[in-house]
Amino acid sequence: MSSTVPTSKGIYPGRYTAQIEGDFVVFLIGSQLNTWRALRRYTRVGDQMSEMQRVLNQHPAKGYLGGENYFSFFPLRTLLMSYWRSFEALEHFARSKDEPHAAAWGEFNRLIGDDGTIGIWHETYMVTANSYEVVYGNMPRFGLARAGEHLPIQGRNHTARGRYSGEQQSTPDTITDSESHVATVE
């Protein structure tokens, strides 16, 4: 059974889902150090991303709903998984001369451009209302649940199909999410 109160480590025991009202955008952005001689410039790129996130977190009216940062060492790579209210809000932040992204992008192009020392990438996904499905088991508020509502799984939300479509699964040969991870050892 899910508890709506987290443990001292921020873990919500049980199974949860997430919900955001209306359409939203998932924006993934990252970078990769392609040669160690560019480490100082790569650190500068990271500092600028941190500054942009600080501004966005301080001003929720800009349309940024939240995000999670990831980092790997080999190769040296970053990822920001973020959620936005709309593509227009994301685009405005990226293009407006009044936002920190414009200056950071200009500096990146001056210092690095297409020299191959640092790779950058992004992916943008427009999500229409009620066209997604999520589940968290024994996790802190994370990802979409951190950007939107964090809800205990109950009733129609018990299966992936139920969370996605709102339909109740009742066929006897259907395996529920909680049963699907059980393995038989012979």
Image: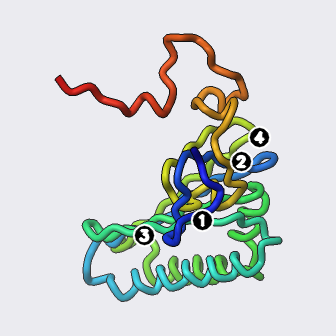
Q: What secondary structure is found at the residue carrying circle 3?
A: loop
Residue holding disc 2: 19
Viewer-proximal residue among 141 and 61:
141
Question: Circles 2 and 4: CB distance less than 8 Å?
Answer: no
Question: Circles 3 and 2: CB distance less than 8 Å?
Answer: no
Q: Considering only order in the chain, which callout, 3 or 1, is on the residue closer to the N terminus?
A: 1
Question: Circles 1 and 3: CB distance less than 8 Å?
Answer: no
Is 68 displayed left or right of 116 in the figure? right
Quarter of image, res 142 = bottom right
Mark 1, mark 2: which one is toward the viewer? 2
Q: What secondary structure is found at the residue carrying circle 1?
A: strand
User: Where 154 falls versus 93 (above or below)?
Assistant: above
Quarter of image, res 36 = bottom left
Q: Residues under labels 2 and 4: Cα distance?
A: 9 Å
Is 102 displayed left or right of 86 in the figure? left
What amino acid does circle 3 point to?
A: Asp
Mark 2, mark 4: which one is toward the viewer? 2
Q: Residues under labels 1 and 3: Cα distance?
A: 28 Å
Residue holding disc 3: 114
What amino acid does circle 2 point to?
A: Gln
User: Where 143 falls versus 113 (above or below)?
Assistant: above
Q: Considering only order in the chain, which callout, 2 or 1, is on the residue closer to the N terminus?
A: 2
Residue holding disc 4: 129
Residue holding disc 1: 67
User: Where 166 falls versus 25 (above or below)?
Assistant: above
Q: How far across and how far down the image is residue 32, in percent?
A: 37, 68
Q: Residues under labels 3 and 2: Cα distance?
A: 40 Å
Q: Residues under labels 1 and 2: Cα distance?
A: 15 Å
**Colour pattern:** rainbow
Q: How far across and how far down the image is residue 50, in percent?
A: 55, 81
